[in-house]
Amino acid sequence: MRLDRQIDLMKEDIIAAIQGCIRIKSVKDVEHATPGAPFGPGIKEALEWTLALGEKFGFVVKNVEGYAGHIEMGTGDLLGILGHIDVVPEGDGWSVPPYSGTIKDGKIMGRGALDDKGPTLTALFAMKAIKDANIPLNMRVRLILGTDEESGWADMDYYLKKEEIPQIGFAPDAEFPVIHAEKGILHLELSKSHARSFTHLVSVQGGERANVVPDVCEVTLKGIASEVIAKQLKDFPFTESVSGKLTSLKGNDELTLTFRGVGAHGSLPQNGKNAILYALQFLRTLPLTSEEQQMIDYILKHPGTGFNGEGFGVTLRDEPSGKLSLNLGILELTSNEVRFVIDIRYPVTYQLNDVFLPIEKIAQSEQFSLKILTHQEAHHVPKDSSLVVSLLKAYSDVTGLEPFAFAIGGGTYAKALPQGVAFGPVFPGEPEVIHCADEYISIDNLLLTTKVYAQAILNIAADPENR
């Protein structure tokens, strides 16, 4: 039973809801955490706002102590839809205010428009369309609202200990048609103190999250003439969309440079241009001390070589999920110490130690401390499972496009379920704008996505005559 007409009539309400949610800056802020707001006030506001919308639609809602929440309809076994309302920091380079929900050229623009407020709300409106049409379901449909997906999944850890775990479900937080396999995700921190203080490098600071390709890196130097640096900046072969400039002069002979690259999701480092790496490559052209040069060379050689772990000797790959990827997401270097964080997505047929042990050996060779910050094992649901088949049929029937299942390096909440997959919202051939400046979701696509999700729910949870 297609609900296309009913969803078309809700167009303005869907747009307004997505705009309203985008306008809440739901970036993690643990410094201002309080009881009921473990990840800060912005995330608390976004969670309560979304739950209130679900309650307004007549659904059963629950706030699980600010760690997560859910919106539910129906009776019977549980079908989970796992979205999230937290977002990564906005970064630089926006042409519109990042928390405005501006409509431009048929798109809703703003941080979270695509990852993941827009898709989460389309799932909610898909549920509303089914409810308003009085279509009976044989299952409970529960939209779970996560709040820490971008940082470490402390929300899901808490929620799944407190609440019933759906055995099957999907996450509207990746790509269409269906993602049936997700690589393992490993965030590693390498750090060490210098044997003696650096002479010229006061600081190198780039990146905020391991799972984002850094688009800005700031360098503070001392003891090198500004004329020398200006000449090297002029002569340096920056690639397209990458720049470096002298931004300020400070006291004590210090000056600051700002390097700008292109952000991207950390699972697809080849889609960005890492500002940290361009900054380090530029620094190699300056008259630094041998100790400073050695440190820069170490970073450029290991996390800075290639996109597939070449620098650490972990170029793993398999047939179900392809190549390992590696992103240098954070660098904090001062005159006394260095810390950097890398994001690794490893293929589904490999284990943690296949990646960790080779990197540990290289870290120990230069007396770096190595620490696992987060780790998610790989996840795989067979292509011929009833879940995957039902979702592919919904996608094909609504869009007319070819249905197929594939693997990704990104990690979604699908991993939290025994039988979970990622399902939309990015259609094949669309540009990758998740975690980028001017993130957007097109209005045409959000309506189409709502229709696909409504049909998917019916395919899984309704009797055949009501599908």
Image: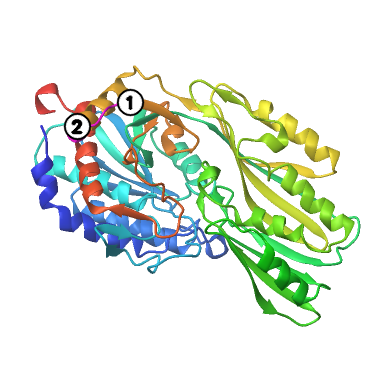
Instruction: Find disc 1 in the rendering and name its residue.
Output: 404
| Residue in the foreground of this view, choosing between 26 and 197 | 197
Can you give x and y, in whole percent of width and height, for residue 134 in the image?
Answer: 9, 38
Left or right of 355? Residue 241 is left
Most common SS among magenta residues: loop
- State the residue at coordinates (83%, 57%): 292
Separation (CA) of disc 2 from disc 1: 12 Å
- State the residue at coordinates (40%, 60%): 438
Q: Residue 158: give its label.
A: none
The amino acid at mark 1 is Phe
- State the residue at coordinates (77%, 55%): 338
Can you give x and y, in whole percent of width and height, for residue 132 in the image?
Answer: 11, 44
Quarter of the image containing the N terminus?
top left
Q: Is residue 113 above or below residue 313?
A: below
Left or right of 228? Residue 182 is left
Q: Bin the neighbour count of mark 2 within 10 Å (Cα to Cα): few under 14, some 14-19, many 20 and up.
A: few
Left or right of 389? Residue 186 is right
Where, by quadrant of the figure, is residue 437 drawn? bottom left
Q: Which residues are magenta?
A: 397-404
The amino acid at mark 2 is Gly
Quarter of the image containing the C terminus?
top left
Q: How is the image coloured?
A: rainbow
Where, by quadrant of the figure, is residue 376 drawn? top right
- State the residue at coordinates (70%, 51%): 340
Q: Is residue 304 above or below residue 309?
A: below
Instruction: Find disc 2 in the rendering and name its residue.
Output: 400
Can you give x and y, in whole percent of width and height, for residue 312 in the image?
Answer: 72, 35
SS for dot 1: loop
Where, by quadrant of the figure, is residue 278 drawn? bottom right
Q: Is residue 344 above or below residue 62?
A: above
